[in-house]
Image: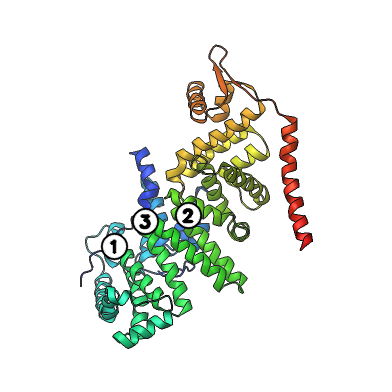
Amino acid sequence: PSIQGFCVVLRLYNFATSERRRQTARRKHLLPSRLRRHSIRDTPFTMEDVLKAVSADGSSIMPQVAPHLSRHLLFPLIQFEGDKAEEKGDDDKAKNILSGKIKLLEDTNMTDYVATLYCDLHGVADPPAEYTKKRQEVLAQLEKYEQATAKIADLLTQDEVVNGLRSDKVANLEFLKNQHGVTMEMVNALYDFGQFQFRCGQYGPAADMLYQFRVLSTDNDKVAASTWGKLACEILSTNWESAVDELKNVREGIDTRLFNNPRAQLDHRTMLIHWSLFPLFNWDGAREPILDVFFSAAYINTIQTSCPWALRYLIAAVITGRTRARNSSIQQKQLKDIVRYVRQEAYEYVDPITQFIHALYIAHDFDAARDALRMAEEVCRSDFFLASSADAFVGAARHLICESYCKIFSRMNIRDLSGKLGLNPDEGEKWIVNLIRETRLDAKIDSKDGTVVMNHPPNNVYQQVIEKTKGGFFRTQVLNAAVSK
């Protein structure tokens, strides 16, 4: 057996850091668990110390996010913070974060990679003997699991066997037992091997093992665990479409298996919200289904009760999705909803992104909105999930400012409007021209006066009355139908 691939560097963080690199030169267990303190020789820093270090400037919310991620999912965030420290030339912080990486991954099977990190941290050529010993233990475990799963793994690649399987798991097990001598121990070995592969950083093989186990097993607890595990595998393999499918499976499991345990439901929904952030900001196809989940009553309640900081990501997803939304009325409703949530949660959580919404839609203060947007841009660029969406967020936010400003004034001074957008007059004029061209606004630019003239069509009172009574008429019909029953 080969250990090649055990030391793979988790690739996911590249999706978040690619934008930063372009501008500046510019991955434990299957079920989620709370971070614990670990000990390793010559690395005295605890994970709590690392989380404090990365959030020292107040811009990172990793200490709030970290407890809801598995260690493999947390690794890209730690890597992202390490890259930032290196870019700023903060050697002490970068060294502490490197120590945090070792502490994070020391209980995994990624022995070669951890050994490399150890050598980098301490400036030595060879790691301690304990790493060589653990490497041999991992190889021995690999050989054991390969032997334990060889028969059932081979059977599940044969078309005649797969074609004989049905949706009834009990019948499938009986078929495999009678026809091919498969035992329950062999099925459970798939789960154990999948978990082992996951801890090695072999996420593709782990996903396959866990899927095969889930198809055959009748152990509800292990099936739930394997679903979480497969979700993590798809995320860490950046298979976003499959990850969204697994999110639906996890959500269904939370709603059905834990319906009589509200506290467990709350905890698992909180986990799911945080795990959903990976596909949400990396694949456009994930935006609509995940936002539908986030805006559902159960998950909005979870955000407000358990993780109000997730409002940052909800707001960013809605704002950056303006140009992608298929249904503008849904997008407008989502925008109104987040304004209400920001108002309700202002006592609990505030950051520049929520402040931008508050200034623009609650306080109606354009200067405060401009200042908040400037700070929100910095927050986006320093946030793992939002870094690649920073430019899109700023552009869409300026659209919202301009949209609100144009609703109030029919003639606007370009210099004043540019100031509200945080642009100089020349940049502002170009931005406004592009906006008029792209959105086909009924507006004209008077270059001599340096103004923008909006053509606001007169409001038709009769049409307003008709629109307002449409809803009342529909509600009356519903009430009449209910009374008739």
Type of amino acid at the residue the image marks with label 2: Leu
* Residue 68 x %, y %: 50, 62
* In this rendering, position of residue 310 left or right of residue 237: right
Q: For marks 2 and 1, give the CA distance.
A: 26 Å
Say few, some or many: other residues with alpha carbon within 10 Å of mark 1 (under 14 / 14 to 19 / 20 or more).
Answer: some
The residue closer to the viewer here, 381 or 414, is 414
Which disc is residue 140 wearing? none
In the drawing, what numbered circle is on residue 238? 3
**Sequence-first tag of 2 and 3:** 3
**Nearest to N terminus: mark 3 or mark 1:** 1
Q: Which mark is residue 277?
A: 2
Mark 1, residue position: 113
Vertical arrangement, residue 115 with respect to residue 54, above or below: below
The residue mark sitting in front, 3 or 1, is 3
Q: Amino acid at mark 1?
A: Tyr
Q: Residue furthest top?
A: 448
Q: Quadrant of residue 133?
A: bottom left
Q: Residues within 10 Å of mark 3 (few under 14, many from 20)?
A: some
Identify whether 381 is placed above or below 179: above
- How far across and how far down the image is residue 139, in percent? 24, 74
Mark 2–mark 1 contact, CB under 8 Å?
no
Is 254 rendered above or below residue 95? Answer: below
In primary-sequence order, the first of circles 2 and 1 is 1
Dot 3 amino acid type? Thr
